[in-house]
Amino acid sequence: MKVLIWSLVSLVAAGAIFGSLILLGPFRSGMISVGTPRENPVASSGKQVYHLEVDGVSREFIVYRPENLSATQEAPVVFVFHGTTGTGEKFYTITNWKSKADSEGFMTVYPTSLKYHVFDDEKVVKGEVKGAVSSYTTKWNAYELPGLIDPKYPDQVLADDVAFTRQMVSFINENYAADESRFYATGFSNGAQMVSRLAVETSDIFAAFAPAGAGMIYDQVLSEIAAGNINFVPRPVLQTIGEVDPKISHYLGVSAINMTASAAEDGDPVKDKFISGFLELEGLKDVGTYELKGPVAHYGYKDSEQIEGSSSYDLLLMKGMGHIYPNGKNYPIDIVNILWPFFSRFSL
C-alpha cells in the first residue's frame, strides 16, 4: 500500500474553414450570414451562436467574448461541456463562466452534444436507483456511449465529438484573436467524461483539463497510449467530486465518499476508480499530498523532478455536495473561482 504524505498545499477554494459561418446575435431574431468576427465588429464580442457542419451534421456552439476585449487582443479560451440532458445554452446560463470571463479577460465556449436513444440496466435518477431506464437525450460521445445505446435503436450513428472539438478550436483560432497556447476544458457529469477523453486525445491543443462530477481513465485507453496508438502528452488535470453525489457513490458502491487521507490508499474506491487511472495517465508517482481545508479535501500529485505544468493531478472532494456543477447558489463554493486560477497557471 502506498503512503500518502501529509502537507499543507495552497488551494484557491471559496471564493470559414469548415463551411459557412452562421451567427445568431443575442439581440436579434432569425439567423443571418455574416463576415468573420475579426472582420465584423458585431461578431467580435458578446454572445454568438454558431453552427459548423461536422460529418454532414450541423453542430451548435456558443462563443462568448467579453466586451472589454479588443478584437485583436489574444485571449485564453475555456470550453465548458454540459452534462446529460443539458445544452450549451443551459451551461452558458447556469454557470458563472461568463462573468468570470468578463472580470479576468478570457473567452468561453459552450458546445451542445447530439441526442441519442440510450438505455441503462441500472441508473440513479434524482437520487433513486432505477432499473431498465431508456431515454432520448443529449450525450457526449465519451468512451462510455457505445455501451449505452438502446438495443431498440441499434443503427444510431455516433458523432465524433473529438473531431467536433478540434473543428471548434480551429474555427476560433481562425476567426477570433485567441491565445492558441491557452485553451482549457471543463465539463460536468457526461461532460466530465468527455473532458477525460479530451485529456487523452487532445493534449496537443488544451493546456489543462477539469472534469467535475465524473471522469475516469480506462485500462484499454492506457494500453492504447502505451502501444503508441494515441499521440499523448501529460497535461495538468483537476477533478472535483461531491461527497454525497448519488451517481458517484452508487458507482463506487458506497453510501458516502471517503474524504479522509485514506481515500488515497489502495483498496479505497476513490483510489481504485479515480486516482489510480489518472496517476497512470499522467505518469505520476503514487505519493501525494492531502489537505482538508473547510469543506474541501484536496489530494495532490506532482513529481518534484517534473517541470511545472507538464503533469499533475489534483482531486477535490467537496463535503455535502451532490451531483451538481457548483455555482455559489446550489453550493457555497463557485467552481469557477477554483478552476480559473488553476487553468491560468498553464500554457502549452
Image (cartoon, rainbow, N blue to C red):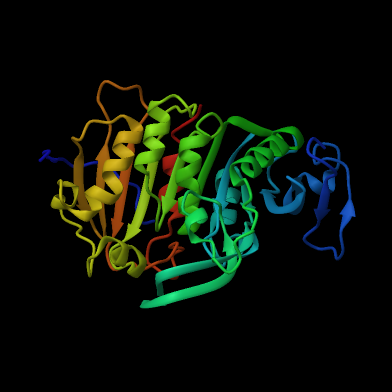
* Identity of the residue drawn at 81% across and 52% down: 23
Establish if 89 lies above or below 340.
Answer: below
Q: Is residue 43 left or right of residue 205?
A: right
* Identity of the residue drawn at 45% across and 42% down: 209
Q: Position of residue 40 (x, y in %)?
A: 86, 42
Does the rendering let one see residue 163?
yes
Q: Is residue 29 left or right of residue 268?
A: right
Q: Is residue 41 left or right of residue 233?
A: right
- Report the number of discs: 0
- Residue 76 versus residue 154: which sits nearer the camera? 154
Q: Position of residue 205 (x, y in %)?
A: 56, 32
Does the rendering let one see residue 309?
no
- Residue 308 versus residue 193: which sits nearer the camera? 193
Quadrant of the rendered structure where residue 116 is? bottom right
* Identity of the residue drawn at 63% across and 63% down: 115
* Identity of the residue drawn at 53% across and 35% down: 202
Q: Is residue 56 left or right of residue 4?
A: right
Establish if 287 lies above or below 335.
Answer: above
- Residue 64 versus residue 86: which sits nearer the camera? 86
Quadrant of the rendered structure where residue 2 is? top left
Q: Position of residue 266 (x, y in %)?
A: 15, 46
Q: Position of residue 254 (x, y in %)?
A: 22, 66
